[in-house]
Image: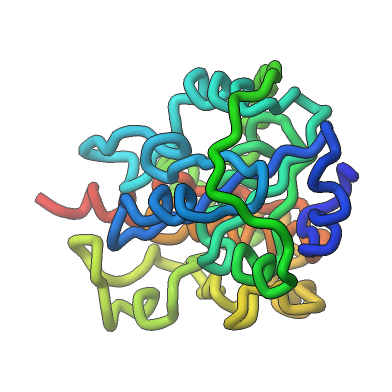
Amino acid sequence: MNNLHVVSAKWLHDHLHDPQVVVVDCRFSLMDIALGRKQYQENHIEGAYYLDLNLDLSSSVQKHGGRHPLPDFDKLAKKLSQIGINSSETMVVVYDDSRFAFASRLWWLLRYMGHEQVAVLDGGFAGWKDQNYATSSTIPVDGIGKFIPSFQPELVVDIETVKSRKDLPEVVLIDSREGDRYRGEREPIDPIAGHIEDAVNYPWMEVTNEQGFVIENQGDRWQEVKNAQEAIVYCGSGVTACVNLLSLKLAGIETGKLYAGSWSDWCSYLVP
């Protein structure tokens, strides 16, 4: 099971009651931060727990560090233990309803914490419901787990690393935002529009179709990147960049690293 990065609804249905499988609902809305939890409380995959992008998968915003800084890992590890995840043993299946935007954040965080047994649910919650598989409004009781992080520091970089490495010929810097934000034609959130100099644009929404299913042959996307020694990936705040990191994994490219602060951190140093 530990070689899976994306699983189908059928796979999860067949393994839903396996004691070594834990399901996590990551639905969230940047426009309405209470919506994801509300949706979860109303209906979710049977037995799934809920983790919140702001409260569980990020820490509080500071002057620098971006809009979704990496979480307090002691707190997150405790939460993972509480929902029954055992380090290097439990298969974790994560889902959302936003084309992996939030589920892939947890996918990446678990891998950064040394837990490789994690996969994203193809098609998300909508795809699950379309198969008429079991849903519930019952909140599961806490599980019994022991999650001890084993950090993989090579998977993340900070602004100083980006500055020092982005112009090296063996490094590619990937902007994961929509093309108009990359080009600076639109910036709905951050104080400055544009992108980091020399970054190339691979929008994260190209990883899935409109229904949230992975597009086949992800390797075809990365022909210009596959030979780089290092692929530094960023987005607005380090969340949707993880969709591209998942895509790189699916393509068999092992050089992906997250610039966790992303554009919101980068441009925080450019404003007065």
Quadrant placement of the N terminus = top right
Q: Residue at 48% x, 21% y: name it.
A: 75
> Is 220 left or right of 207, judged from the image as shown?
right
The vertical placement of 6 against 118, above or below, is below
The residue at the point 70 percent across, 16 percent down is: 146
Please indicate, yes or no, whether residue 168 appears anywhere in the rendered image. Answer: no
Q: Residue at x 79, y 38 (%)?
A: 21
Q: On the picture, is 254 further left or further right than 113?
A: right
Can I make out residue 81 in this image? yes
| Spot occupied by residue 186 in the image (x, y as percentages of width and height) | 27, 79
The quadrant in which residue 180 appears is bottom left
Answer with the quarter of the image where residue 81 lies.
Answer: top right
Picture coordinates of residue 223 (x, y %)?
Answer: 75, 76
At 70% from the left and 77% from the top, the residue drawn is 221
Q: Residue furthest left?
A: 272
Image position of 135 (left or right of 64): right
Count of labels in the image = 0
Q: In this view, does 91 lie above or below 271?
A: above
Image location (x, y in percent) of residue 106: 58, 44
| Colour scheme employed for the rendering of this structure | rainbow
114 or 165: nearer the viewer: 114
Which residue is nearer to you in this view: 198 or 146? 146
Does residue 165 appear left or right of residue 28 in this picture?
A: right
Pick the residue in front: 191 or 145: 145
Residue 227 location (% of width, % of height): 77, 64
